[in-house]
Image (cartoon, rainbow, N blue to C red):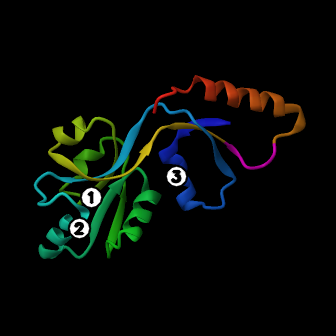
Amino acid sequence: LAITGRDWVLDHRTAFPSSPVREVADLRRSRYSISVVVDEQIPGETLGAALAYWRAQGRSVIRIASEYANLADHFARQHHIGRYQIVPVSGASEGFVPEDCEILLEGTETGASVAANRLKVIERIFESTNCLIGGTQPVADGAAALYHSLIERLRASAPVSA
């Protein structure tokens, strides 16, 4: 068993769909959104409007910065962005927009950092919380009672309201 963010589980499962990792319980803590962030000066409030703006400027490749490289790649394909480049980043990723990338796929909690860096959220992709993960293989008989006890204790400690 391990505790991680649901965002990281989704990023991992996007790259490795047959991975033997599964979410055992949503612990409903550390709630934040994974969002599409762009420069605040980009006209419009949608991804489509932003793409139209960049294409009108002659941008042939849209650069997407993210700690979640696999999710960013999936997002670009799912939204038919066309030619794109994933820029893997770590740390203060807000500094990459607009000079080094057009889009930042970022975890946002309050939006204060986004606003402070003159950026804006144009789409929320999904909400993440922390979760308990485990393997898909059955637990050995000798460890099963402890395994299930730990899961139930962690589930019971999760906040009731989402």
Q: Quadrant of the N terminus?
A: top right
Give the residue type at disc 2.
Gly
Q: Residue at x 31, y 60 (%)?
A: 64
Which residue is tagged 2?
48
Question: Exactly how many numbered labels are in the figure?
Answer: 3
Give the residue type at disc 1.
Ile
Give the residue type at disc 3.
Leu
Which residue is tagged 3?
10
| 7 to the left or right of 47 | right
Which class describes the residues within 10 Å of circle 1: few (<14), some (14-19), or many (20+)?
A: many
| 63 to the left or right of 16 | left
* Residue 86 position (above or below residue 28): below
**Residue 157, x across and y down, in percent:** 58, 23
Q: Residue at x 34, y 67 (%)?
A: 85
* Residue 149 position (above or below residue 80): above
Q: Residue at x 18, y 48 (%)?
A: 119
Which residue is tagged 1?
103
Find the distance from the CA under tag 3 to the CA under tag 2: 24 Å
Name the image quarter holding residue 75. bottom left
Magenta extent: 134-138
SS for callout 3:
helix
Label 3 with label 2: CB-CB less than 8 Å: no
SS for callout 1:
strand
Tell which tag, 3 or 2, sits nearer the viewer: 2
